[in-house]
Amino acid sequence: MVPRAGESEAVKAGQRPVQFVALLTDDGQRIEQGIVWRVYEETSVADRRGKLILTERVPSPMLSLKPGTYIVNAAFGRAHLTRKIAVDDTQVSEPKVEKFVLNAGGLRVTAMLGGKPAPQGSVTYAIMTDRDQTDERRVVLQDTKPGLVVRLNAGIYHIVSTYGDANAIVRSDVTVEAGKLTEAQIQHTFAKVSFKLVERSGGEALPDTQWTIQTPQGAVVKESVGALPAHTLAPGTYTVIARNQKRAFRRDFTVQDGQTADVELVAQ
């Protein structure tokens, strides 16, 4: 157990008071809430942390640490910084101050549908890193709701925003600057489409029908089962295939932005 320097009668013999301070930028303000500190033992294995010694949620904690080397992680939302610190055995009354400059900023995404804010719960988005040297991206956060401020390290990020259950997806790159709030507005285009397979035009929908929606190139957009499935699609041209009782029927259709469409297939 590592005591807080301010909570014991005196710093234990052989230990030294150390204070951790987190800053948004090198010359910016101190972070006063929402930060989590984790202190680990040093390990001889490269790129690995040792045993977790403590977790502290006080913004600028004062701790008493034995002389040695530690790995300290400061996390502020999805922004974080991990570095090594050394505590010597010098007996001084003043604490050793370790500053962590997170170079953090905020990102707030607003989703729009037809020029108006999207209804709550209808849109989610993922935040991904910029492409690395191998042309890969890493997921930072998934299933994020628009309107919330996400704390991130400064840098370029890739947003993937999804409306509905299919391919009404918008991608955008944003730059988060340290000490600033970045506002990103995503404009979704979409069409609401329902499907039914009937024995004759205008008839009752056949139950237990299997549906496959494809692009003109044959890529599967959405699969479902039911008499009257409804999906949210990006504007464009598609092919829908309906399978029922070992029979298959297909139809091409096109939908425009903001359209509500009924696509009927006649089983003949």
Image (spheres, helix red, strand yellow):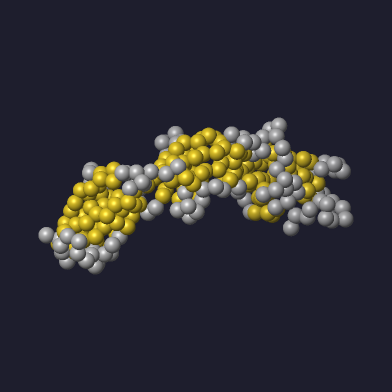
When asked about the image quadrant of residue 24, the answer is top right
When asked about the image quadrant of residue 188, the answer is top left
Decide which of 4, 152 is in the foreground and name it: 152
Q: Position of residue 258 (x, y in %)?
A: 36, 46
Decide which of 30, 43 is in the foreground and name it: 30
Reply above or below: 224 against 256.
below
When asked about the image quadrant of residue 225, the answer is bottom left
Q: How many marks can you see? A: 0
Name the residue at the left extreme.
Answer: 268
Identify which residue is drawn at 22% across, 66% down.
Answer: 204
Identify which residue is drawn at 75% across, 55% down.
Answer: 2
Position of the N terminus, as image quadrant, is bottom right
> Along the horizontal axis of the image, is 262 left or right of 125?
left
Q: Is residue 212 visible?
A: no
Position of the C terminus, as image quadrant, is bottom left
> Along the horizontal axis of the image, is 69 left or right of 157?
right
Q: Position of residue 103 (x, y in %)?
A: 63, 36
Q: Position of residue 190 (x, y in %)?
A: 36, 46
